[in-house]
Image (cartoon, rainbow, N blue to C red):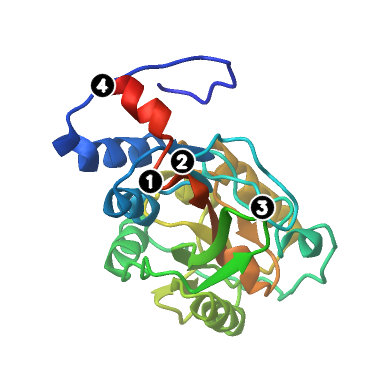
Amino acid sequence: MREEIFGPVLHIATFASGEISKVIEDINICGFGLTFGVHSRIDDRVQGFIDKLKVGNIYVNRNQVGAVVGSQPFGGEGLSGTGPKAGGPQYLKRLTNPAKEYFEDEDGPLAEFKDIQQGIDRLDQPSATALSVESLPGPTGESNQLSELARGKVLCLGPTLKAANLQKQCAKSAGCTALRIANGGDIDGQIAVETLQGLSGFDAVMYWGNETFAREMRVALAERPGPLLPLIANADASRLIIERHVCIDTTASGGNAELLVSVS
């Protein structure tokens, strides 16, 4: 599958049990991360999917129809969305219009592409461990857990060093790692809009300067292949958080026995 298809389409692909790690890797590489469903009696195998998949909603031993407000916040990641989850704790705040941070742009030399890319590559990868895990209410026999994880590597574009420093603090508070590109920053100088389209390995951009330049950067980010990347114009650390939800039918006692017997 090379694109996200809202069917109904029944797509069947077989694989050996020893190839599950490769299957998970292939799913993540495709870039889409809306929902995933698994039926299994083996708890360790289920936990392996939960821990490794970059998917917004995972359903275990049940169907993939949910999205109950307050119980099953819904939304994807990568090419399937940037957050927040509809019906989740961050959703209402995103419908408001927070005050934007603003700093006057500074003149300075354009930073070299190779220097920026090397700076990104040198950044530590944020921990894959959840920053928080919250149990959400649901009907008897159903477990709902919402986890928050760091979005990843953040480009802090200032435009001033003071702004870039504040952006780095915001990124670190969300568990992310950050690269400051500003006069006197980790990478000395300013970034060119077209440079954003060639860079790789970053997950978000923070910029608190000229709105015209910010609009050009949003266009450049939107035209990039791969995951959708946000441009963040305020100090809201929740924009640097990824939400993942897992819903488990705990009454299935290890899976839908009738289904498992029929295919064994």
Labels 1 & 4 near each other (Cβ < 8 A): no
Query: Where does label 2 land, which residue?
Result: 61
User: Residue 150: percent from the left, percent from the top?
Assistant: 48, 67
Type of residue at label 4?
Thr
Q: Report the Cα–Cα distance between label 4 and label 2.
A: 19 Å
> Quick one: label 1 or label 2, which is nearer the N terminus?
2
> Image quadrant for the N terminus?
top left
Query: Where does label 4 land, which residue?
Result: 14
Query: Where does label 1 land, which residue?
Result: 254
Give the structural element (helix, strand or loop) at label 4: loop
Q: Report the Cα–Cα distance between label 3 and label 4.
A: 31 Å
Q: Report the Cα–Cα distance between label 3 and label 1.
A: 24 Å
Labels 3 & 1 near each other (Cβ < 8 A): no
Type of residue at label 1?
Gly
Q: For the point 57% across and 45% down, which residue is it?
A: 76
Q: Label 1 neighbourhood size at 10 Å, few (<14), some (14-19), many (20+)?
A: some
Say above or below: 60 vs 240.
Answer: above
Figure quadrant of residue 179: bottom left
Q: Label 2 neighbourhood size at 10 Å, few (<14), some (14-19), many (20+)?
A: many
Q: Report the Cα–Cα distance between label 2 and label 3.
A: 18 Å
Query: Where does label 3 land, which residue?
Result: 73
Q: For the point 42% across and 49% down, which residue is it?
A: 54
* Closer-to-camera residue (100/139): 139
Give the structural element (helix, strand or loop) at label 2: loop
> Quick one: label 4 or label 2, which is nearer the N terminus?
4
Type of residue at label 2?
Asn
Labels 1 & 2 near each other (Cβ < 8 A): yes
